[in-house]
Image (tube, rainbow, N blue to C red):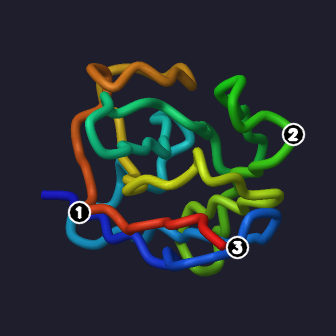
Amino acid sequence: QLQLVESGGGLVQPGGSLRLSCAASGFTSGFTSDYYPVGWFRQAPGKEREGVSCIVGSTRTSTKYSDSVKGRFTISRDNAKNTVDLQMNSLKPEDTAVYYCAVSIRTTECRLERRLYDYWGQGTQVTVSS
């Protein structure tokens, strides 16, 4: 079984930055594979969980971003630490949400549809407020 743990959330002022990290334990081959995407999702109160970004590949990577975060967020894989990180810059109050990382083993494409992901972390809270 693959377990995912997110870290790095917190309270930040508008315009600030945070870096989230997703680490895996257990059966990690899906997490470290060149073939299966790792995604970041978020869920704000009263809203559906939405895809934020994904990455597939370990040395040569392919990434995707939602329109709402494009140009502000950067996803990357740290092979030495075995983590997938989400650097979030120019944060806005509307970025406030619980952020989850997830792994899909049913597709090899970097996609942001929640239904495609099989393993999920417990989430980390990000609050953007002055």
Residue at 73% across, 40% down: 61
Report the amino acid beneath label 1.
Gln
Looking at this view, is 31 or 67 the one in front?
Answer: 67
Looking at this view, is 38 or 89 the one in front?
Answer: 89
**Crowding near the residue tagged with mark 1, few <14, some 14–19, many ≥20 C-alpha atoms within 10 Å:** some
Secondary structure under tag 1 reads loop
Looking at this view, is 48 or 38 the one in front?
Answer: 48
Residue at 64% across, 76% down: 12
As displayed, is residue 120 above or below residue 54?
below
Q: Quadrant of the N terminus?
A: bottom left
Name the image quarter holding residue 103: top left
CA gap, disc 1 and disc 2: 26 Å
Secondary structure under tag 3 reads loop
CA gap, disc 1 and disc 3: 24 Å
As displayed, is residue 98 above or below residue 62?
below
Choose mark 3 or mark 2, whichever is in front. 3
Q: Earlier in the sequence, mark 1 or mark 2?
A: 2
Q: Earlier in the sequence, mark 3 or mark 2?
A: 3
CA gap, disc 3 and disc 2: 19 Å
Residue at numbered disc 2: 71
Number of numbered markers = 3
Residue at numbered disc 1: 122
Name the disc covering residue 13, or none. Answer: 3
**Given the current orientation, which residue lies at the most extreme front position?**
130
Report the amino acid beneath label 3.
Gln
Residue at 66% across, 73% down: 130
As displayed, is residue 94 above or below residue 127?
above
